[in-house]
Amino acid sequence: MPTDTHLPTVHMTLPSGDPVRVRPLSPTDRDRLAEGFLQLSESARYQRFFTPVSRLSNRDLAYLTDLDHVDHFAWGVESVDGEGVAVARYVRLGAGVAEAAFTVADRYQNLGLGRRLFQALAAVAALHGFARFEMTMLADNVAMARLAGSMGAAFDPPVDGTVRCEVALEERLWADLPHLEEFLRLAGEAAGVEVDRRRPITR
């Protein structure tokens, strides 16, 4: 979750009216990510990892923040006061497909942040040639299922308490995302890729 307000950042106002700052995660975010994880409720941690996790190990933190920003990308979100708010990431599974995962602090749930993050993450994934997201969630994670469903997800039947779904990455998903060009520019800079913001995303 971002810490340095001098780094390039997208300043976004949520549908709820709450302002937040968003930028790609980097290794400088390790300590803040560890701190933010400790602020999550036990339920939120379980929904993300499907097992009780009390803290992130050094190996976990290295994996979650040392990213190439192409095959493994993550947006970090913080409040204007510097409070860690959310992380949205994708990781390549194979040709054209990535696994997507979202973690939102309890106080910032149901404010419209999840949808905006999904849109921003999907736009970046499409930019890098991915055609779909796969997601796995607990069967009782109603909020995540609702979000995925609103994005056109196709769900498999539940298996052992979890549900898998797929979302096709189509431009309609992020067409109304505020600051889309800024999100793509930051993602391109993080990956070392020059993005022509005048052209639509193509695969």
Image: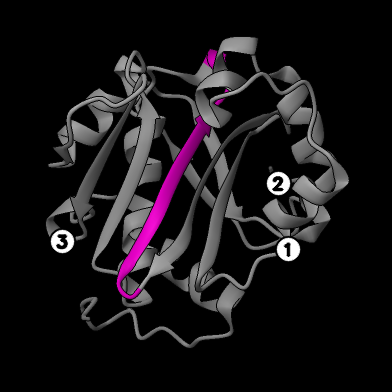
Prevailing SS of the magenta stretch: strand
- Marks 2 and 1, the one that precedes in the sequence: 2
Mark 2 packing: few (<14 Cα in 10 Å), some, or many (20+)?
Answer: many
Eyeballing the image, is 179 above or below 142? Answer: below
Q: Secondary structure at mark 2?
A: loop
The image quarter containing residue 78 is top right
- Marks 1 and 3, the one that precedes in the sequence: 1
For badge 1, the amino acid type reads Asp
Per the image, the residue denoted by label 2 is 2
Eyeballing the image, is 52 above or below 176? Answer: above
Per the image, the residue denoted by label 3 is 170
Q: CA distance from mark 1 to mark 3?
A: 28 Å
**In the image, is residue 97 part of the stretch drawn in magenta?**
yes
The image quarter containing residue 63 is bottom right
* Residue 3: image location, x then y, percent: 77, 45
* Residue 92: image location, x then y, percent: 45, 65
Q: Is residue 154 visible?
A: yes
Does the CB distance between marks 2 and 1 fall below 8 Å?
no
- Residue ID at (48%, 25%): 18
